[in-house]
């Protein structure tokens, strides 16, 4: 500890003067180096005046000839200042030797014995230790610069050692709670990471540095942070981001320059990055335009493989430029096309789609027939063609496949049917439950207009089947009875028309709401049955293990999945182990991940862990989270978590509510929501006065709550408390006002 050394700091009278000069000079230099307001770092001649330097030189000579007269701590200070002198003269090997001789004593001075209390004096010594470690890092950095340029291996070793020492310095300043010092020293590590070409690490460091410099730094430091971000983005081929970041760096640097003729090395670097990134961005944009043109001109029916290849290339390009929303939409289109043309077996969380038989003809999806649900389709078609059934209510649990049954089974079947009166059957799928509230325009539908159109065409030439899928959404987005009443009345009037029938698809938990519909409109008088009678209701259940096995085997043959038969048996066993049946949505999700991860054998399946099918479902969710971009994964997990609750339900939340819960992360919210909606994990429910969001399926709730969302929420709460305390104590920034700071934060390219 310091005291034991200071107790020995006694020298002969003729040596006292030299020791005092050295100690005073060291203290003066350390004070300068540890002053967060003095940037950039200064050399000894800039810190000490000529008289002080002359006295120091004489004292160093005196002590060097009588080293035994100084205590270990005084010797360490002498070695430190000798190291600075050699470093300033670019004698780096000699400087490093002096610093390394000085280091052990500084380290020992900061050790805490059991039971000792950390004092301000110890923290002060730790700060000095941080400076010594920092200069050792600078020496290794310079040695790497001076090494043989033809052999980068040796240079990299030195630069690695440099960044280790500089990071140790930053850790020391963090331990003593001197974030303003971290802000002053952190950029040196960025310069080393550039030489190591550690672009991902540089990007993360620059993000952290930017947060610090917006509070403690200068405009030059902020410009340098954006320069680091730009260079890292450029070397990861993110040209659009690199261009924007380089422009920011130049703009901030220009703002800070007092002399217009002064052009810094950094400015030249930012200009170079800007030029290169814009040139590459132009090439990237040209490539994207060419692919988008090819996409428009390629008919997926005539050449599905070429069309899918275009989509794959576009998705990669968009994702690399952090255009995650475009990438997600392309991904979902690719998935839909691949399934539509029999090139993909499983669709994951999305609805099944009918298969494309010819350019103008669609047929029932093979999963419908393989699962035995073709019988359900035939039963529903028979009801529709019967004069006895005006209203059909298809019900079942969330994720049981009601929407897939309608989209991939019933609708294509109806398009091939005629009634016994030779009427053409026209299925009309609806899933809009609020737009009639708005003023009608070209983008909305109006109940009176639709009803009038149906009344005019009520001539018996065709049978219109209105299909309202996911009808439970009505009760979520219209929580008040008076909001629902216009749709109730519209459907009642439609059922009064001889050429119209209605199908409602609804979750079993919402069936009781139909009693309200019946009571408010006297519906029984129109449909001739009680609303919840067996003549009206049609139940859709989970798959039996046998049905699930038949589906997988059928897809295995038609899409060449090449799954081993014993693997199929094990998957079905795992999926049905809890309740004896297989949830269709879980079968699709697990199947999709088997396909994505190329798990075709039982051996590979077992390598996934003790619970392989659960691992696959979690991997599926992780894939969607990663599609939001690496820097947005945390916010994606939080959004999904906030769309669940402890009671196991899926609350509806507005964007404003999510933004309030997410605190400082809200700036990324729109991007994440758009990606999750595009990929089908989150539903966007149009509503007045503001749209609301909901997790897509109950099935996702336990998966989402395994993603450590609760821990991240706790971290956000802690961050908010820290930010509030900091705001109360923070002084106004003397170079960048709060408005500019907020703009910089908003413009950060994440």
Image (cartoon, rainbow, N blue to C red):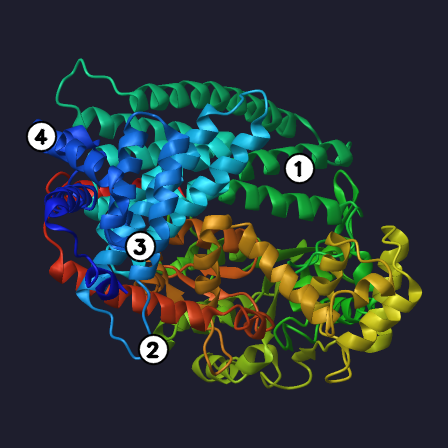
Q: Quadrant of residue 248?
A: top left
Residue 114 image label: 2
Residue holding disc 3: 106
Residue holding disc 1: 312
Q: Residue at x 33, y 35 (%)?
A: 226
Q: Which of the two discs, 3 and 1, sits closer to the camera?
A: 3
Residues 692 and 86: in front is 86
Q: Residue at x 78, y 65 (%)?
A: 607
Classed neighbour count for the residue bearing mark 2: other residues with Cα under 10 Å, few (<14), some (14–19), many (≥20): few
Please provide percent x and percent y for residue 496. 55, 69
Residue holding disc 4: 49
Quadrant for the N terminus, please.
bottom left
Label 1 SS: helix
- Reading the chain from its start, which is encountered first: label 1 or label 2? 2
Classed neighbour count for the residue bearing mark 4: other residues with Cα under 10 Å, few (<14), some (14–19), many (≥20): few
Question: Residue 739 vs residue 148: left or right?
Answer: left
- Reading the chain from its start, which is encountered first: label 3 or label 4? 4
- Reading the chain from its start, which is encountered first: label 2 or label 3? 3
């Amino acid at each position: 500890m310091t005291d034991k050394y200071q107790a020995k700091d006694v020298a002969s009278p003729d040596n006292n003067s030299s020791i005092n000069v050295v100690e005073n000079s060291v203290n003066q230099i350390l004070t300068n180096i540890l002053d967060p307001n003095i940037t950039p770092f200064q050399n000894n001649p800039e810190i000490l005046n000529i008289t002080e330097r002359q006295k120091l030189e004489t004292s160093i000579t005196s002590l060097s000839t009588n080293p035994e007269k100084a205590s270990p701590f005084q010797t360490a200070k002498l070695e430190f200042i000798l190291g600075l002198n050699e470093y300033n003269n670019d004698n780096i090997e000699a400087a490093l030797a002096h610093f390394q001789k000085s280091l052990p004593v500084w380290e020992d001075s900061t050790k805490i014995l059991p039971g000792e209390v950390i004092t301000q004096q110890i923290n002060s010594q730790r700060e000095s230790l941080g400076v010594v470690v920092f200069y050792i890092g600078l020496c290794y950095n310079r040695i790497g610069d001076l090494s043989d340029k033809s052999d980068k291996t040796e240079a990299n070793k030195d630069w690695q050692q440099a960044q280790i020492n500089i990071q140790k310095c930053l850790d020391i300043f963090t331990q003593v709670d001197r974030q303003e010092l971290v802000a002053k020293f952190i950029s040196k590590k960025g310069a080393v990471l550039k030489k190591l070409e550690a672009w991902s690490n540089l990007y993360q460091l620059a993000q952290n540095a930017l947060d610090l410099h917006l509070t403690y730094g200068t405009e030059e430091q902020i410009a340098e942070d954006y320069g680091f971000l730009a260079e890292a983005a450029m070397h990861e081929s993110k040209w659009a981001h690199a261009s924007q970041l380089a422009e920011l760096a130049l703009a901030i640097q220009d703002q800070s320059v007092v002399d217009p003729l002064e052009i810094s090395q950094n400015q030249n670097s930012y200009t170079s990055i800007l030029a290169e990134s814009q040139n590459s961005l132009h090439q990237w944009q040209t490539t994207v335009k060419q692919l988008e043109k090819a996409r428009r001109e390629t008919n997926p029916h005539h050449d599905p493989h070429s069309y899918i290849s275009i989509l794959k290339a576009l998705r990669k390009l968009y994702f690399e430029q952090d255009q995650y929303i475009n990438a997600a939409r392309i991904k979902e289109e690719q998935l839909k096309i691949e399934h539509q043309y029999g090139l993909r077996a499983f669709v994951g969380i999305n609805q099944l789609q009918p298969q494309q038989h010819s350019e103008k003809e669609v047929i029932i999806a093979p999963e419908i027939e393989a699962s035995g649900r073709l019988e359900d389709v035939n039963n529903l078609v028979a009801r529709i063609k019967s004069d006895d059934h005006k209203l059909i209510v298809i019900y079942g649990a969330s994720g049981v496949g009601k929407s897939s049954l309608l989209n991939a089974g019933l609708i294509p079947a109806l398009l091939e049917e005629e009634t016994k009166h030779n009427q053409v059957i026209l299925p009309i799928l609806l899933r809009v439950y609020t737009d009639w509230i708005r003023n009608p325009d070209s983008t909305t539908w109006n109940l009176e207009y639709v009803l009038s159109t149906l009344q005019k065409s009520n001539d018996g030439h065709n049978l219109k089947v209105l299909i309202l899928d996911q009808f439970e959404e009505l009760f979520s987005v219209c929580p008040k009875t008076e909001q629902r009443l216009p749709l109730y009345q519209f459907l009642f009037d439609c059922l009064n028309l001889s050429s119209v029938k209605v199908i409602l698809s609804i979750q079993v938990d919402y069936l009781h709401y139909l009693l309200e519909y019946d009571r408010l409109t006297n519906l029984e008088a129109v449909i001739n049955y009680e609303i919840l009678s067996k003549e009206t209701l049609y139940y859709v259940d989970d798959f039996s293990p046998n049905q699930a096995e038949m589906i997988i085997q059928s897809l295995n043959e038609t899409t060449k999945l090449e799954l081993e038969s014993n693997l199929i048996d094990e998957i079905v066993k795992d999926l049905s182990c809890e309740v004896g049946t297989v949830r269709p949505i879980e079968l699709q999700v697990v199947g999709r991940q088997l396909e994505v991860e190329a798990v075709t054998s039982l051996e590979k399946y077992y390598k996934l862990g003790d619970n392989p099918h659960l691992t696959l479902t979690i991997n599926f969710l992780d894939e969607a989270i990663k599609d939001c971009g690496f820097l947005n994964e945390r916010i994606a997990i939080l959004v999904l978590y906030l769309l669940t609750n402890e009671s196991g339900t899926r609350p509806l939340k507005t964007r404003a509510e999510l933004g309030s819960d997410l605190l400082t992360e809200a700036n990324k919210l729109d991007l994440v929501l758009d990606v999750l909606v595009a990929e089908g994990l989150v539903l966007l429910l149009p509503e007045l006065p503001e749209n609301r969001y909901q997790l897509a399926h109950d099935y996702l709730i336990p998966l989402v709550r395994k993603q450590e969302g609760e821990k991240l929420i706790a971290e956000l709460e802690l961050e908010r408390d820290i930010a509030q305390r900091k705001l109360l104590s923070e002084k106004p920034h003397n170079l960048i006002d709060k408005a500019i700071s907020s703009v910089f934060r908003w413009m950060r390219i994440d």
